[in-house]
Each structure stands twice: as C-alpha cells, then as structure tokens.
Image: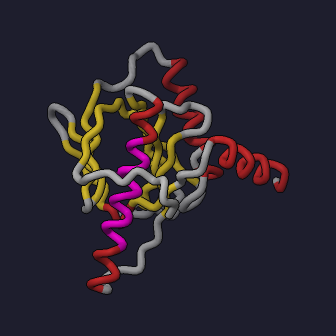
Amino acid sequence: MDEDIRYQRLPQSFSVRELGSSEARGLWGIKHTRKPVDLMVAKAKSSSTPLQPQVELRITEDGCEIIGDKFKKVFPIHTVSYGVQDLVYTRVFCMIVVKEQISADRKPFDCVAFVCESRQAARNLTYTLATAFQAYSRKVRSTGTSKSRFAIDLRSADELEMDLRKVDSEA
C-alpha cells in the first residue's frame, strides 16, 4: 500500500447511522457498490421515517461490530471483502459482506452502508478497515489458516470515477 495511507490503531469506533443493506453483484469493486448505495440513499430520501438512530461501528482485528442500544451485529473480518468511502455520497462508507448462509435465489454478497458524521469520518473509517485487513492478513500468513481475499479502495475520487466510467462504457 501507499506510504501516505494513514494507519489507524485498532480497535476504533465511529458514530454512524446504518443506511441499510442491499444485494451486491460482486465480491469487490466500486462497480458493485454503486447501485446498492444509490438504491439505499433513494429509499432513505423517499421515506418519511428517519434513518436508524446512531450506532457505534467498531472496527477490530477480528471484524466489524455494529453496536446499538439493544443489539449487536458482528461481521467477522473474513466475511468482509471490500470497503470504500462512496464516490457520490462522500459521507457514506460501505462494505461488501459475504453472506455466511447462501440461498439459491440470491447473490452471496450484501453491500452494507453507513452514513458517517462527516466526509473525513467516512475516509478514516476506510483507513481503519484497511488496517484491520492488514492485521488479518498478517495473522493469516503467520498461521496459514485461511485464503480469504479482500480489498480496500483508497483511490482518489477522480480515480474511482474513471474506473466507474470505464465499466459503464464496457456495458
């Protein structure tokens, strides 16, 4: 990874609102988060009910935890395949999660999105997930226990947009 990446200490917590989750068509890449995020934002904007209350999104070496007043949802790090700050909605952080239980009628991936307090918070969340991926990668290399693949997208908005345009022109 680039030298300018800001490594974060783990664990790290962020105050976010869960935007929701939507089926993703692939394991990683902004091309697989674009449509789900657009759908979730449109649904939130058209709904008369406000977003869910703020929750804590905690990133650890073991994964991502969503902690609310009366619940806790855990995404083990080996099930998170991709994370990125959204290109259009820059306060949105999203990640692709591989479902543990797969049904024949649905894709095995979900895009889970969160609205952060600021653009910088969404960016820091992305860096923190990158740090968690690196910690997991070191652990896997030292123990040889898994061959999971994951990606974190730290490209600039211009680079992401160029990649997205390239995908659209190929379609």
- For the point 38% across and 63% down, which residue is it? 133
User: Where does residue 117 sit, x and y in percent of width and height?
Assistant: 38, 26
Please tell me which residue lies in front, 30 or 102. 30
Q: How many labels does the image show?
A: 0
* Residue found at the very far bottom of the displayed protein: 144
User: Where does residue 99 sit, x and y in percent of width and height?
Assistant: 40, 60
- For the point 28% across and 41% down, which residue is it? 57
Please tell me which residue lies in front, 33 or 58. 58
Residue 105 visible somewhere in the drawing? no
- For the point 83% across and 56% down, which residue is it? 170
* Residue found at the very far front of the displayed protein: 3
Please tell me which residue lies in front, 8 or 73. 8
Residue 48 visible somewhere in the drawing? yes
User: Where does residue 154 sit, x and y in percent of width and height?
Assistant: 53, 52
- For the point 60% across and 38% down, which residue is it? 87
Q: Relative to 116, is 75 on the left or the right?
A: left
Q: In this view, does 167 lie above or below 145?
A: above
User: Where does residue 124 sit, x and y in percent of width and height?
Assistant: 39, 42
Q: Quadrant of residue 158?
A: top right
Q: In this view, does 85 lie above or below 83?
A: above
Q: Quadrant of residue 88?
A: top right
Chief secondary structure of the magenta portion: helix
Q: Does the magenta stretch include residue 131?
A: yes
Q: Relative to 40, is 79 on the left or the right?
A: left
Q: Is residue 72 magenta?
A: no
* Residue found at the very far top of the displayed protein: 48
Please tell me which residue lies in front, 150 or 109. 150
Q: Give the range drawn in magenta.
A: 124-137
Q: Relative to 88, is 125 on the left or the right?
A: left
* Residue found at the very far left of the displayed protein: 70
